[in-house]
Amino acid sequence: MVKEIGHSLREYKKPSVATPVLVTFEVLLECLIPMIIAELVNKIEAGCTLETILKYGAVLIVMAGLSLVFGVSSGAMCAAASSGLAKNLRKDMFYKIQSYSFENIDKFYVSSLITRMTTDVTNVQFAYMLIIRLVVRSPLMLIFSFIMAFVMGGSLAWVFVALVPFLGIGLGLIVFKTIPLFHRAFRKYDALNSSIQENVKAAREVKSYVREDYEQKKFGAASHDLRSDFQKAERILAFNHPLMQFCMYVVMCVALSYGSYLIISKTGAGIGVGELSSILTYGFMILNSLMMLSMAFTMIAMAGESGRRIVEVLTEESTLKNPADPVMDVKDGSVDFEDVSFKYSASAEKNALSDIDLHIASGETIGIIGGTGSSKSTLVQLISRLYDATEGAVKVGGVNVKDYDMEVLRNAVAMVLQKNVLFSGTIAENLRWGDPDATQEQLEEACRMACADEFIERFPDKYETYIEQGGANVSGGQKQRLCIARALLKKPKILILDDSTSAVDTHTDAKIRKAFREYIPETTKIIIAQRTASVEDADRIIVMDGGRINDIGTHAELLKRNAIYREVYTSQNKEGHDLED
């Protein structure tokens, strides 16, 4: 995990190395200052001159200044390294997710990916900041303070040695108790974010069914559950400070009492007021270092769970890979399914598609009809290799899709999916997803074919009209037509419409299909629809049922011989006059 996350340091390795070096010098100076002060106190007690006091004062000012410079510099370097690591981690995760196949994406919830790229990365950033600064500083401070305590106080320093195990055991128990609570609480972030995302995304449905109270209770339960775990952890961590204070006061009482006795009885063998004051200072440094270490280890342990989740994303390998010597040209829009079967995961009990044998000629218009769950969408997703067939072969232009460069294949296959997505930006910017270099004339031509020009021209800003996130300021039918126009700009060899005109009226639907026949006759068109009217003029219509091809034929042929198609048609056309022909 550490090695994988470490790869994201890259250009921030120098500040990562510089930080502990600067911290070392800062700690060294901080540990030397009490020794200089002790010498000054002894000099003053012995009756030194003003010149001596000024000389020691100048040395202390210089040392304090240097310590400040090293401290500020280490802080700046630490901030640069930790924030840089966070930036690179988010970038690496985002780029990795872009390479995922649909199968990879199916393994993670969207809310989980968002949590990993935000909260998890922030936790790792904070932990890394602690590691290169505090986790370096505290042990060094502990070691140097012990050494200086023995140098300055001799046997008196054993007071700290006696108390350290007690404090260490107490802090260790606190860490041991809180780590499982943080781990458990952190896993609940996904559930909380999922509840938020689902509620916001389905805001219209929530309000339509007046389910605000239910959603509030569901969110409240998830939030309460998370709060409960964090509260338990914080209650245990609250013992940190009182334990630290208790140990500090014990050390102060013992050191002052025993040190004063040595000084007064003259048996201190060189221990004076200055040495006693420095011993107390080093005691505070030792105990403070232990407390800081305990806090750091608790936070790092919590971040360890975040790191593991981040590495899961970074090490996930796409199930779809380019071949060693990919085909870089799609000859035509022909599509062949040769004994294809498919299931979404190796552990799935049944196939989503079974025994598909289908041959589509280039330029042909194919309609696909079938009930919900008949795997219509699954069938077409194999064409652009969003998934790979489990058995058999899918060919485009006579070549197995696995042999193509994936970018080349997907540029030749334009898909307008069931869930139409528009991005924040102008209409023109959204359309240019199909072709970044499209001219204004090409945008207008694609929109005329998709019948989108009708409403675009009514907008005051026309093609510069701003589209809100998710296309919230346009209707469902307008969104569908913009997505069709965007797909047409790719000038694909295969155009797939996956129920993409469901929100469009039948008249507009017919105009779009007419434009396809007239302007892109050489493009293979595959239209998945719920309405028979959307596919009845297709060259052939495929009837899907239970993941299998039930029948293939023209509209007239299927009306006569196929019960499924006839039932769909008659339910949508009550007169059923075609049956009498």
Image (tube, grey):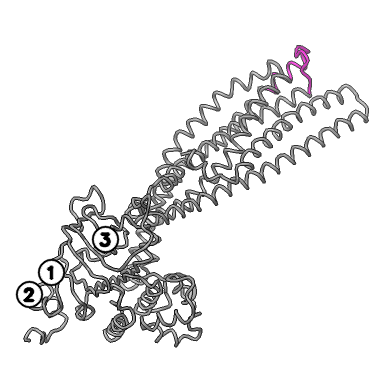
- Residue under label 3, please give it: 395
Tag 1 residue: 551
- Kind of residue at disc 3: Lys
User: Circle 1 — which element?
Assistant: strand
Please state which of residues 115 and 191 is positioned toward the viewer in this rendering: 115
Q: Residue 568 location, x and y as percent?
A: 14, 76
For the residues labelled 3 and 2, the Cα–Cα distance comes to 30 Å
Q: Secondary structure at mark 2?
A: helix
Q: Please, what secondary structure does the residue beneath circle 3 have?
A: strand
Q: Tell me: 287 left or right of 107.
A: right
> In terms of depth relative to the viewer, which is nearer, 475 or 182?
475
Determine the image quadrant of residue 387: bottom left
Other-residue count near label 3 (Cα within 10 Å), few / some / many at <14 / 14–19 / ≥20? many
Examine the rendered structure and indicate whether residue 294 appears above or below residue 80.
above
* Image coordinates for residue 460, horizontal then vertical, percent: 50, 86
Figure disc tally: 3
- Which numbered mark, 3 or 2, is in the foreground of this view? 3
Please give the residue where the numbered disc 2 appears in the rendered image: 561
The structure residue drawn at horizontal position 75% and vertical position 28%, both measured from the top left corner, is 32
Segment colored magenta: 255-273
Mark 3 vs 2: CB contact within 8 A? no
Q: Quadrant of residue 482?
A: bottom left
Q: Position of residue 569 (x, y in %)?
A: 14, 79
Quarter of the image containing the C terminus?
bottom left
